[in-house]
Structure formats: C-alpha cells, structure tokens
Image: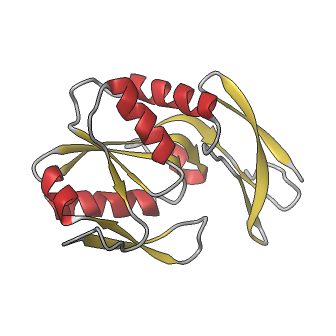
C-alpha cells in the first residue's frame, strides 16, 4: 500500500493512500488512537484563533471528536458540541441538515438536539474538523449553527485537502494533496 508522509503540528505520520474513485485517491488522516497527534494538533489550532473570539466549539461525528475534546480541554472550555450523524432517542426536538461527504459518498444527515441548539442561540460558534475537502460537512455544520440561531465565528481544520487549501475562510495547519491511482500527487 502506498503512503504519504504528512508533516503536521511538528509530527510526521505516514498516511495510507485510499481509493475514492478510479481516478481519485486520498491520504487517510485518522486521529483516533493517536494521542500525541491529537494533543499537538489541538494546541496548534488554538494558536490560530484569538481567545474570546468564540463561545463554543462544534464538530461533526466522529473522527474529529478527540480533536475537539482536546481543544476544549486545552482552552478551558466546559462544553463543546458534536453534530450526530444519526438520530438518537436522546436527541429530543432535534434540528437536522443533509450532507454528502467525500469519504462516505452518500447522503447523510447531521443532527443537534433541541437543548444543544438552544445553547447555541445567539452564540459565536467555531467550527472544527479534522480534514476539510469539498466543504460539504463544513457547510452542513454552518447550516446547523444558523438553524440554531448562532453565528459562525470561524472555520478550522487540521488539514485542507485539494481545493479547500485555496479557501481564505478556513484556517488549517497543513495542506493535504489528492493522489492518482499510482499514488502520485495530483497537480
């Protein structure tokens, strides 16, 4: 299997290159189980945002949960929010939006409970993700914040993949290229 050496937050990880379509491959960036990487990335992301510029952190389930938890811990936040990818019995009075992610390749829904939405009303929300690629998950989280009555204070990710690297509205730690079937970086 081809890998790509990713340099981020002062660390290097070899990312497996995984097929999305016949002519599109991505470097699989997974924070789960990598405490050193999660702590380092959380600290570096927090350096990119001005303290006091947001009230709450929000991410989508699931790969960014360790990241947002560590960001909350390092910043002293008592609460952060996770948009769920499926309806749960405890999500009473939930709000929802639809999203299509590059890694799932199918429509999904993101949910916030009515109680979480009420806490976001009138608040500044910093949206955090592990990798931003097409921006669809980001857009869905923005819609959730809007439906809840909050405002987006900023958008950030550990990595920006492909065209997301050119977006000026996203703060990120490192670019992540796309790959061809041979594992070469696509131009």
- Left or right of 118 on screen, residue 38: right
The colour style of the image is secondary structure
Q: Quadrant of residue 20?
A: bottom right
Q: Does the image show residue 147?
A: yes
Whole-percent x, y for residue 72 in the image = 36, 33
- Left or right of 11 on screen, residue 180: right
Whole-percent x, y for residue 35 in the image = 60, 32
- Left or right of 93 on screen, residue 29: right
Vertical order, 78 against 76 (above or below): below
Vertical order, 157 against 10 (above or below): below
- Left or right of 71 on screen, residue 160: right
Task: Identify the residue at horizontal 34%, vertical 28% (top origin).
Answer: 49
Vertical order, 75 against 55 (above or below): above
Task: Identify the residue at horizontal 60%, vertical 43% (top origin).
Answer: 31
Whole-percent x, y for residue 161 in the image = 59, 49
Vertical order, 103 against 164 (above or below): below
Q: Does the image show residue 157?
A: no
The single residue placed furthest to the left in the displayed view is: 122
Task: Identify the residue at horizontal 41%, vertical 32% (top origin).
Answer: 71
């Amino acid at each position: 299997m081809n890998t790509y050496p990713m340099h981020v937050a002062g660390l290097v990880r070899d990312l497996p290159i995984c097929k999305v379509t016949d002519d599109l491959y991505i470097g699989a960036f997974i924070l789960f189980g990598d405490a050193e990487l999660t702590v380092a990335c959380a600290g570096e992301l927090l350096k990119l945002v001005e303290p006091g510029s947001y009230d709450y952190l929000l991410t989508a389930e699931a790969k960014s949960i360790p990241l947002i938890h560590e960001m909350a811990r390092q910043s002293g936040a008592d609460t952060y929010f996770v948009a769920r990818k499926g309806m749960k019995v405890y999500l009473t009075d939930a709000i929802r939006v639809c999203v299509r992610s590059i890694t799932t390749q199918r429509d999904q829904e993101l949910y916030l409970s009515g109680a979480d939405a009420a806490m976001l009303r009138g608040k500044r929300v910093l949206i955090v993700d592990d990798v931003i690629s097409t921006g669809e998950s980001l857009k869905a989280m923005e819609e959730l914040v809007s439906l809840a009555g909050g405002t987006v204070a900023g958008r950030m990710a550990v990595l920006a993949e492909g065209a997301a690297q050119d977006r000026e509205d996203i703060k990120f730690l490192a670019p992540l290229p796309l790959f061809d079937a041979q594992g070469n970086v696509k131009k």
